[in-house]
Image (cartoon, rainbow, N blue to C red):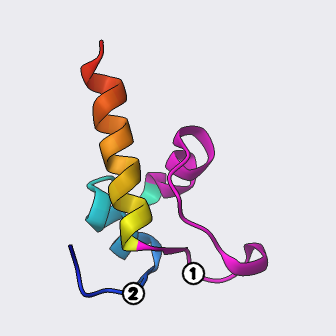
Amino acid sequence: MTDHIIYSGAKAISEAVGVNWKNLPWYIREKGLPAFRIDGKGSYMAIPDDLREWILKMRDENLKR
């Protein structure tokens, strides 16, 4: 998949999953995007494999319409 161990920062995570970085908190809160901040502070972080699983889940849910 990728050689990243972790994506760090809203822009990097957003680019990886194809959403606008300004909407990242909404995707985390409302759509379960698997990104986090340690103790709620600092930059968002996400594991590439978790993001891939989330994208596949979103794909599957939205193709069932």
Q: Is residue 21 magenta?
A: no
Give residue 65's position: percent from left, percent from top: 30, 12
Report whether 59 appears left or right of 38: left
Give residue 37's position: percent from left, percent from top: 65, 74
Q: Check disc 2 and report its element: helix, strand or loop.
A: loop
- What residue lies at 33% left-to-right and 58% top-to-bottom? 52
Q: Amino acid at mark 1?
A: Ser
Question: Crowdedness of circle 2 by 10 Å Cα count: few (<14), some, many (20+)?
Answer: few
Give the labeled residue for mark 2.
Answer: 5
Quadrant containing the N terminus in the rendered view: bottom left
Residue at the left extreme of this rendering: 1
Indicate which label's residue lies in the foreground, 2 or 1. Answer: 2
Above or below 41: residue 51:
above
Q: Check disc 1 and report its element: helix, strand or loop.
A: loop
Give residue 48's position: percent from left, percent from top: 37, 71
Q: Amino acid at mark 2?
A: Ile
Front position in the image: 16 or 4: 4
- What residue lies at 62% left-to-right and 46% top-to-bottom? 29
Give residue 18's position: percent from left, percent from top: 26, 55
Magenta range: 23-47
CA distance separating discs 2 and 1 = 15 Å
- What residue lies at 45% left-to-right and 71% top-to-bottom? 10
The numbered disc on residue 43 is 1
Q: Is residue 34 magenta?
A: yes
